[in-house]
Image (cartoon, rainbow, N blue to C red):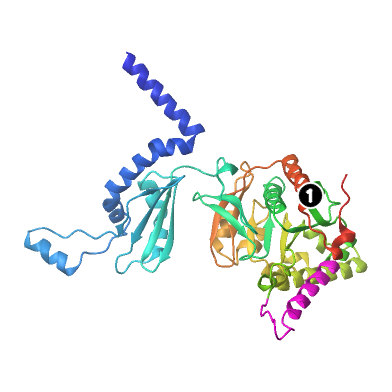
Amino acid sequence: MYTLISGVAVLGALLVARRRFPVFFWWLVGYPVTAVRVTVSYRATMDACGLTVPASAMRRATARMVGRQAAPVAPRHSLPRPTGSGLVMRLRLAAGQSPEDFTASADRLRHAWAAHAVHIRPIKPGWLELRLVGWDVLADVDPVNRTRPEHLRLPLALREDGDWHVRDFRTVPHELILGATQSGKSVYLRNLLCGLARQRVALVGIDCKWGVELAPFSARLSALADTPDAANDLLDALVEEMEGRFRSIGSARSDPANAILTSDVWGLPEELRPVPIVVVVDEVAELFLAAGKEDEKRRDAMVTKLIRLAQLGRAAGMYLEVCGQRFGSELGKGATMLRAQLTGRFCHRVNDESSANMALADIAAEAALAATTLPAERPGVAIVGDSSGGWARVRSPYLSLDDAAAVCRETSTLAPYLPGLAPFRPVTW
């Protein structure tokens, strides 16, 4: 009786640990069981999924000599290596196999090994990385476990394979962020602003909804425009700032004795390098709306300046984060041209299929399809992709507006002073 009660208690404790402490449960129980299951059933699973090749002529001849039939050959693999959310193996492809064969069979491998997900990634010619995820890591995203941020490199969302999606401005200078109301777009933006607020970066906001989204962060902003007229003037100042930076790059080459050959601000010495500027445009559709001819002139001017910043800003250390509830060609002239310059794409749940296609269809058709199936009851889940064609399902850790505003107030002394943007510096109390 005592043994039965003890067994029930241990089982109950494991069930509680699995639900409330999934990482602990994985290291204690999940990984050993799954590693044994994968290792023991590896050859049979590969054969059942059609991921084997016929044995070589030498092996077939040797098998016939002993009266046996040579079994198909599965790819060689490394020992399952544990990670914080699953395990990883390296596979050596057999002759005639391609990574697409394994990608197409990922779902069959997931069911065969009772895993939450299986992801396949080519490492180098002839080698694959098979990453098995033990549970739904997006159910509860803990920001404590995120990777360490670096200058202009921020871990902003957890990927479904257990790794963190890193927003690298040096690699992907501009980004389009889409999401319907209550989709988690604002939470992603708060994580972005708080990560940048702790760094030597100038933050500029354009929020034509009278600043309701970006005004709470005004203590850390170097400039803020909350109406279309102010946004037009601020974009003028940003274009002038960009032109001044290009003149600085050119003047660095003018001295024959100490010429600095560079095509962007990052090649300048640190004492001459201007501070990076990240421009956050909240609800970009407000910049495209026009009620009359005067509004149309202003809209065309603003869109032209935005496109100029997107085309040339990277070399000047100026980066765009363009946000909106929807984005389509019907917004008006320049919409598709602006989108083409926004290399990064971050699409939450949207209300219309055309917005998902506008954000992701030029990256991968399956990414746009995945964006249309995001659940409304799980805010923060999004599809992230870039022009390389890669995409993944991610989720941002929750960050309240009060906590995000507090971070911006604490880091207000880090806001750099830029003379050209000084007239747009928000007043804080």
Task: Mark yes or no: residue 357 visible.
Answer: no
In the picture, measured across the screen, residue 209 lies left or right of residue 52, that is right
Give coordinates of residue 245: x percent, y percent: 77, 73
Split into 4 quadrants, where in the image is the N terminus? top left
Residue at image position (87%, 60%) is 422
Q: Is residue 256 above or below residue 165?
A: below
Residue 244 among those drawn in magenta:
yes
Q: Which residues are magenta?
A: 236-263
- Which residue is most to the front? 257
Task: Mark yes or no: residue 274 visible.
Answer: yes
Give coordinates of residue 332: x percent, y percent: 78, 68
Q: Secondary structure at mark 1?
A: helix
Residue 209 among those drawn in magenta:
no
Q: Nearer the viewer, residue 50 or 380?
A: 380
In the picture, measured across the screen, residue 390 lies left or right of residue 98, that is right
Residue at image position (67%, 60%) is 354
Q: Amino acid at mark 1?
A: Ser
Q: Which residue is mark 1?
A: 412
Give coordinates of residue 225: x percent, y percent: 85, 57
Q: Nearer the viewer, residue 239 or 252?
A: 252
Split into 4 quadrants, where in the image is the C terminus? top right
